[in-house]
Image: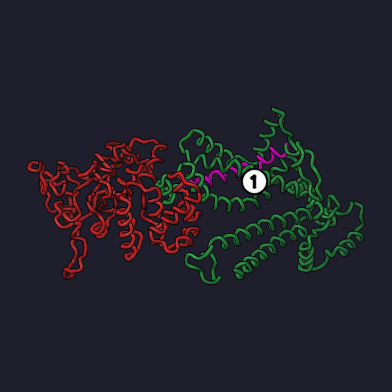
Amino acid sequence: MATFIVRRLLQSVLVMVVVALVGFALFAYVGDPINNMVGQDTSFEDRERLREDLGLNDPAPVQFLRFVGNAVQGDFGLSYRHGRPVADLLVERAPATLELSFAAGVFALLVGVPMGIHTALWRQSWLAKAFLTISLIGISLPTFLIGILLILVFAVWLGWMPSFGRGEVVQIGWWSTGFLTASGLKAMVLPAITLGLFQMTLIMRLVRAEMLEVLRTDYIKFARARGLSARAVNFGHALKNTLVPVITITGLQLGSVIAFAIITETVFQWPGMGLLFMQAIEFVDIPVMAAYLVLVAALFVMINLVVDILYVIVDPRLRIGGGAVGGGGGR
Amino acid sequence: MTESLLSVRDLIVEFPTRRGALRVVDGVSLDIVPGEVLGVVGESGAGKSQTGAAIIGLLEPPGRIVDGTVHLEGERLDTLSGDQWRRVRGRRIGAVFQDPLTSLNPLYTVGRQLTETIRTHLDMTEKQARARALELLGEVGIPAAADRLDAWPHQFSGGMRQRVVIALALCANPRLIIADEPTTALDVSIQAQITALLKRLCREHGTAVMLITHDMGVIAETADRVAVMYAGRLVETGPVDDLVNRPRHPYTEGLMGCIPTMHARPVRLDQIEGAMPAPRAVPPGCAFHPRCPLAVERCTSERPPLVARPPLATACWVRSPDGDAA
């Protein structure tokens, strides 16, 4: 078990080093950072002095090591545009993105799971067919289009929801939350649906497929033969067995929800990390871009690592070289 | 003969497909009297499991009963609605399936599955149900039942799991148990134990058993009467002793020829040439005629009825022609 975790950790570190290299390459090769920092009338000598002071004349490996060393300590330098530490900017923006992702995830689960169950249990009902059709739309329409359509219908035509921003937020320490005010909650609805729709259809189809699979198993047939009620069979026995893989996939999708929040945040002008990144691209704000890149990569690596370790804990057969595998051993 | 517990008449089960309906059970009639063990034998695909599934109302969709009736203690079963079935399944008819490794839900403890079933059928508190579960586990021969009640299915061996499955089938003291290949997935030494256990419990509880198997050895040991199925049809029924020792139908004869014996000198076992036809390709007349050594002209065109000539009832033009039967 320990060797397995160490090996996975080493692989994760390798991935992060590669990502850091890409982030570093942005600095070194996308435009000239000095040009981005100084005004047009700065003399050539001043520029060279600045270049020397900032260590930009050092060999590339030295610069890379410096970049990694700082990044590990959470220091990604100053934003060209805001003139503030990138880390501060990200921390400031993180709550907005995390809350949006959380709301989208909850929406996807609360709607997707029941829809999946319904379509599996009552395959022939018109509602099930309607759900499947909707899910096809959810999977095939691009996120930005869904967002814009929702804004058009609910913000412009009906005027029920705000079309942009977070509404009022409450500051709890460094965390700003939109969950505590009515306008904050209201502002969250459309972006959360936009961001969660794809995941919802994914979860619905996954639950449906898994449930159909489980309903075919012998223990479900046997549960029916024991005379248990349809409710006990479907929700007690079948659903519980369905949820194991669903939880896994949902966990894995969490990373992509946060990463894909970029588009939703842009459409709704949601002041999160994704919007920060989009603006950074427009202004060639390389420190922000590099930091965001590294952050998202770290998130993915971390989630995958946790899922891998969970698998090993759950399934004893995966414990490669980790002691004897007991035949039907303890829990 | 005493009043039938279960009475199946002219049962026809079909699976509609795009290329026409597949008739997997074709006009099967059988009776089971209280406390009796009826063995149903036949090759894979002979329709024995589908007959069992039809009786307990668990045909896999789109399979359905298209004709015939099923009565349990005078009550018609094949027309029951889903809700009405629940009063029958588990309570009056229990079931034991082939693979004990997959018959139990892996995410619930054995005790939980037992008490759940008990409380579905009997008016008991959780505590009473637990006591009953414990008693049942002891009855099916689980050692240290009290310690095993909260164990998970994967902590039991195959034989032990089949014992648990039998305990689950017995929860509400049903009148009839449909046992579909209950020993096929077990190794031979365990098979004998499970068969003996099933037989003993049913004698003690007065429960009748419909024992579906392809193993003539199990039948000879356990059953009181035997029904032989071929290509969805019943070809011969009768008391186990007569049917095993003096079969009339050439197919039954062939089945008996396939059993190795301890006494005979090691000779090549007889084997029925050819294979059973698929439901789509059942020949006209007697379904067995292409493989039958005795087949005559009539066998290829007319389907032989099941003719009772005690002690056996046989469907064969050659061995049991109808004219002189009744």
Chain represented in red: B
Percent across and percent down for residue A277 are 75, 49
Residue at mark 1: chain:
A
Placement of the N terminus of chain A among the 4 image quadrants = bottom right
Q: Dividing the picture into quarters, in which one does residue B240 lie?
A: bottom left
In this view, A217 is above or below A305: above
Mark 1 neighbour class, 10 Å CA radius: few under 14, some 14 to 19, many 20 or more: many
Q: Is residue B47 above or below residue A67?
A: above
By secondary structure, the bulk of the magenta-drawn segment is best described as helix
Here the colouring is: by chain
Q: Nearer the viewer, residue A122 or B131?
A: B131
The residue labelled by disc 1 is A105
Image position, residue A245 (x, y; %): 54, 52
Residue A198 visible in this rendered orientation of the protein: no
The span picked out in magenta is A186-213
Residue B23 visible to an observer of this rendering: yes
Q: Amino acid at mark 1?
A: Gly
In the rendered image of the structure, the colour used to display chain A is green
Give the side of residue A74 with respect to residue B84, left or right.
Answer: right
Find out whether residue B262 is within the magenta segment. no
- Left or right? Give the position of A91 relative to B261: right
Name the residue at the top extreme. Answer: A157
The residue under the point 54% across, 68% down is A320
For this orientation, the residue located farthest to the left is B324
Q: Position of residue B136 (x, y in %)?
A: 41, 55
- Residue drawn 35% across and 59% down? B185
The residue at 64%/69% (across/down) is A6
Q: Is residue A4 above or below residue A277?
A: below
| Depth order, front residue of A258/B112 | B112
How many numbered tags mark residues here?
1
Residue A208 inside the magenta-drawn segment: yes
Give how far across and how far down residue B184 sits, in percent.
Answer: 33, 58
